[in-house]
Image: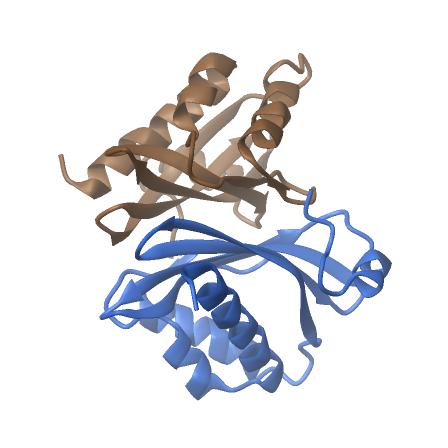
Chain colours: A brown, B blue
């Protein structure tokens, strides 16, 4: 599997874990040693593994948190050891655009950053094209 | 200069070029050969150098576009050849949180991705701490 396919697979795993609300797997997806950050929609950025995982714990254990699905993921490989994925998140009736950054840590791809923010894409367009999405 | 300082410098250059509305320098900051993407606030993501630079042309040549300033930039080095910066953008009376991804292309750091989205940080807090910013 090439780097592009590997990070797209990891990106899918991230949203699977998000939907399953599996904090243990979420912790495994994120890098252990590399510096990490996260910017949840509407909030200031968070830096550091402990702080980032605390924020995911708050989200994944919140019974009112809506379901999320990932659409139109596209991978951009920056180097042998780093890549990012841009995709759309359908969260309830809203659509967010997301950047997920991945890097190899001890040879394994791990997540090092996530940012999601609102975007003016219709959730219906995501339903129609669950694989392709509206990346221009 | 280490990688962290190098990408922080490039991040500053990006906002300088943004403020100066210098499309030639903006084109130089972005990678030529590596795949690039960009997610402007509220809009779907854009992929490809030509498409990304076209979007910057529309912004930089728009006389109504407000000024932007960068605050609280923090660098996260992923590998020898890749890093990202998280920072805050003061745009008029709003604050955006931004991710800027950089990668080395032929040995030189270039921008490969930018995402900015709204966040609930007071612009006043940025005025008070122009260097530190509210990164948590």
Q: Is A53 located above or below residue A81 in the figure? A: above
| x, y percent for residue B90 | 72, 65
| x, y percent for residue A47 | 59, 40
Seen from this angle, which residue lies furthest front?
A: B1
Q: Nearer the viewer, residue B92 or A91?
A: B92
- Residue at the (46%, 54%) spot, across then down: B84
Quarter of the picture containing the N terminus of chain A is top left
Q: Is residue B42 visible?
A: no
Q: Nearer the viewer, residue B94 or A78?
A: A78
- Residue at the (64%, 44%) spot, across then down: A45
- Residue at the (62%, 81%) spot, across then down: B19
Q: Is B52 located above or below residue A134 in the figure? A: below
Relative placement, left or right, of B51 versus B75 is left
Relative placement, left or right, of A33 versus B80 is right
Q: Is A66 located above or below residue B117 in the figure? A: above
Q: Is residue A35 visible?
A: yes
| x, y percent for residue A44 | 69, 45
Q: Quadrant of residue B136?
A: top right
Q: Nearer the viewer, residue A132 or B89?
A: B89
Q: Is B128 located above or below residue B136 in the figure? A: below
Seen from this angle, which residue lies furthest left?
A: A1
- Residue at the (33%, 73%) spot, across then down: B50
Relative placement, left or right, of B64 versus A101 is right
| x, y percent for residue A119 | 57, 49
Q: Quadrant of residue B42?
A: bottom right
């Amino acid at each position: 599997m090439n780097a592009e396919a590997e990070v797209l697979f990891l990106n899918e795993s991230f949203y699977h874990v998000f939907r399953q609300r599996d904090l243990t797997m979420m912790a495994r997806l994120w890098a252990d040693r590399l510096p990490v950050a996260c910017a949840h929609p509407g909030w200031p950025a968070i830096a550091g593994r402990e702080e980032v995982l605390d924020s995911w714990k708050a989200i994944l254990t919140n019974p009112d948190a809506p379901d999320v699905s990932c659409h139109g993921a596209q991978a951009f490989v920056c180097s042998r050891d780093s890549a990012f994925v841009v995709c759309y998140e359908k969260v309830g009736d809203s659509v967010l655009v997301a950047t997920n950054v991945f890097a190899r840590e001890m040879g394994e791809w791990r997540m090092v950053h996530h940012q999601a923010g609102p975007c003016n894409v219709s959730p219906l367009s995501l339903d129609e094209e669950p694989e392709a999405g509206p990346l221009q």
